[in-house]
Image (cartoon, rainbow, N blue to C red):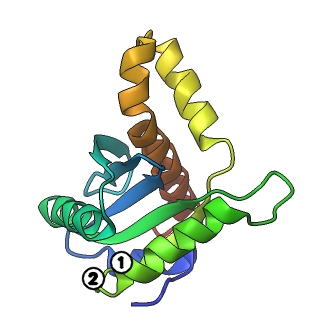
């Protein structure tokens, strides 16, 4: 399925389906999933990156367990709004996973999401070592919560 705009996500989230958010890192994939009411983002354990096929299988299995109806992926846009190599990597990841799944995907500008997630973890007094293993899923939750808030603002949540 091709990527869809954020404004169209609600039509894929019927019958108790949830919305997933992912933060694509170099070594891990951060995952978060909404509740059935589409109000709150809940981080899931990160997926350690190996090969695309294995990563996609692990991600899609998680989506199946969580009854995901659509997925938002953070798009790492530069501060000036341009797209660099990391944004192109995210777009390529979605193009490849779309061949394996009928789930719709949407992109969300993730500028500063990792910074915000790290600040939140620091405020919760999470140790530096534990932050390293949780940061990508916390960033995914931050991205997903932004989308959920946007959907509620549109009256679609």
> Would residue 101 be seen by someone viewing this image from the given angle?
yes
In the picture, the quarter occupied by the N terminus is: bottom left
Image coordinates of residue 15 in percent, x first then y, are 20, 74
Residue displayed at 44% across by 41% down: 136
> Badge 1: few (under 14), some or many (20 or more) residues near its Cα, within 10 Å?
many
> Would residue 157 be seen by someone viewing this image from the given angle?
no
Measure the C-alpha gap from mark 1 to mark 2. Answer: 6 Å
Q: Which mark is residue 101?
A: 2
Asked whether, in this view, residue 70 is left or right of residue 74, the answer is left
User: Which residue occupies the foreground of this view, 122 or 68?
Assistant: 122
Q: Are marks 1 and 2 in contact (CB under 8 Å)?
A: yes
- Tell me the SS state at disc 1: helix
Res 5 → quadrant: bottom right
Residue displayed at 39% across by 16% down: 129
State how many labels appear.
2
Identify residue for label 1: 97
Res 101 → quadrant: bottom left
In the picture, the quarter occupied by the C terminus is: bottom left
Asked whether, in this view, residue 126 is left or right of residue 139, the answer is left
Res 100 → quadrant: bottom left
Residue displayed at 43% across by 44% down: 141
Image coordinates of residue 107 in percent, x first then y, are 56, 69
Residue displayed at 52% across by 58% down: 147
């Amino acid at each position: 399925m091709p990527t869809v705009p954020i404004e169209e996500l609600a039509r894929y989230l019927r019958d108790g389906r949830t919305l997933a958010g992912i933060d694509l890192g170099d070594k891990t994939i951060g995952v978060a999933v909404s509740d059935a009411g589409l109000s709150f983002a809940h981080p899931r354990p990160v997926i350690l990156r190996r090969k695309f096929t294995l990563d996609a299988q692990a991600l899609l299995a998680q989506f199946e367990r969580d009854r995901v109806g659509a997925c938002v992926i953070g798009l790492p846009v530069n501060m000036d709004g341009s797209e660099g190599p990391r944004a192109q990597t995210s777009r390529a990841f979605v193009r490849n996973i779309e061949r394996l799944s009928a789930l719709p995907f949407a992109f969300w500008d993730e500028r500063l999401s990792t910074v915000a997630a790290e600040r939140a973890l620091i405020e919760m007094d999470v140790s530096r070592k534990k932050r390293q293993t949780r940061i990508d899923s916390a960033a995914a939750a931050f991205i997903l919560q932004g989308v959920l808030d946007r959907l509620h603002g549109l009256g679609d949540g």
